Image (spheres, grey):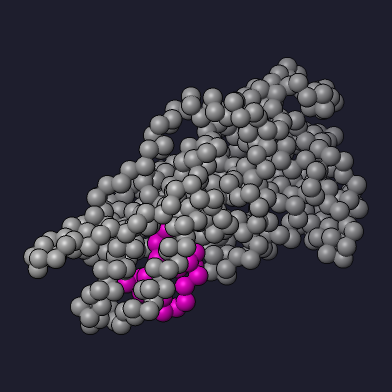
Amino acid sequence: MSDPILVAESKEQIFLLPKMANRHGLIAGATGTGKTVTLQTLAENFSARGVPVFMADVKADLAGLSQPGGNNPKILERAKELKIDNFTGEASPVVFWDVFGEQGHPVRATISEMGPLLLGRLLELNDTQEGVLNIVFKIADENGLLLLDLKDLRSMLQYIADNADKFKTHYGNISAASAGAIQRNLLALESQGADKFFGEPALNLKLVFFFDEAHLLFAGIAPAVGQKIEQMVRLIRSKGVGVYFVSQNPLDIPDVVLGQLGNRVQHALRAFTPRDQKAVKAAAETFRQNPKLKVETVLTQLAVGEALVSMLDESGSPQIVERAKIVPPRSQVGAITADQRKEIIASSIIAGHYEKAIDRESAYEILQARTGEKAQAVGAPPVAASPAAPEGEKPSLLAEALGTATAAFQPTIGPRGGRYDSLATSMVKSAMRAASNSIGRQIARGILGGILGGSGRRR
């Protein structure tokens, strides 16, 4: 990955230095100014250099990376204008993922991967209920009971509630009301499609991440999750990982995160309202000023495919901002057909690996066996298994937000033999939530952790 990436051209060519790619970046601009095409150009260049890239395709228009381009008149015109020699269409290798397994390979996570803290936030538990959930994970860990799917967690809750007196001395009071409240929230989650997300095989991937529509990532974010994202953006570059936020407005990114984004491409901003004017001024102030350029004025005058660009130089310092035209992508711009998507999914190197869910022995099976043995010992029939969630129900926003905080925290408590410390895994789940979100709000919050890559699970 030694060749610099040609990003844009002004009076001179502007490059993104590969060794500075892990200093993170920002692609910003109003709707329709060319952000997604800029993202596509960077992504295909990273891919060509052997760097795995993950992108949350919220609008389903990044799938064109899988097809050769070169037929778009505007793209050809830009290539000719920038005097790019031998400009031909080229496709990039692509793997599609979908949390519901419809538009890509299924994405799953285990209960232990998410951990009690994130589950507590997802289920909107109060402090007392979160305390009970922590006890559930602790007891499962100490007894070697794997928490892989929702029925494992529900069985553990039932087991602990039934034996509250036994655990009270060591773990503190376990409220039956709190356990019941958690069960009700789990039932609601399950009915909305969570059973498709929690389970195995879970993902174990190492990736570099772009998050399109990044303003959705930070909207209404919990302070603790925001702090974790900030921490990971600061520390993750030591792993050789770059995180690039793509957003309509730089003000959508918290200042503590924005300050960590070294490579910047700023497309046009609109200045119709006081907030818009504030955003223009704030964006202008983030660049290393060019005495020949009135950045604040130019920001509202940029044409489609044109941007203010500032990359890091060899020393890691921001270069003087330049008004430049973005290099066009060689892959297809826009969505692909359903048949093309199906063909890519079927021919993927991982086709068939994640499609079939695995339900190995875990807390549910072990506790059901114990219950059956006790019932037989006293001559009573075994307790019936909990009914599964109905199939085919339309997932709601709650199910679509399942991965919201997953990658923002690294789980610290998990059952023996079933815990993952894979941040790459967590990131993918969160991002897939964004990709499958039909409404586009309350998107995954904690994507970033996934880039670190995962250590193996304990067995």
Tell me where residue 219 appears, x and y as whole percent.
Answer: 65, 62
Left or right placement of residue 405 versus residue 250 in this view: left
Tell me where residue 327 appears, x and y as whole percent.
Answer: 75, 32
- Residue found at x 22% / y 59%: 368
Write down the region rendered in magenta. Answer: 113-135
Left or right placement of residue 397 versus residue 200 in this view: right
Number of numbered labels in the structure image:
0
| 121 in magenta | yes
Q: Quadrant of residue 152?
A: bottom left
Give whichever of 211, 341 is nearer the camera: 341
Q: Quadrant of residue 253?
A: bottom right
Q: Is residue 347 visible?
A: yes
Q: Is residue 316 visible?
A: no
Is most of the magenta stretch helix, strand or loop?
helix
Residue 37, above or below 167: above
Q: Residue furthest top?
A: 86
Left or right placement of residue 414 versus residue 432 in this view: left
- Residue found at x 44% / y 48%: 391
Residue 51, above or below 432: above
Give whichever of 98, 288 is nearer the camera: 98
- Residue found at x 27% / y 64%: 140
Give whichever of 428, 449 is nearer the camera: 428
Quarter of the picture holding the N terminus: top right
| 267 in magenta | no
Left or right placement of residue 309 versus residue 164 in this view: right
Tell me where residue 431 appears, x and y as whole percent.
Answer: 55, 49
- Residue found at x 51% / y 29%: 345
Tell me where residue 265 appears, x and y as whole percent.
Answer: 74, 45
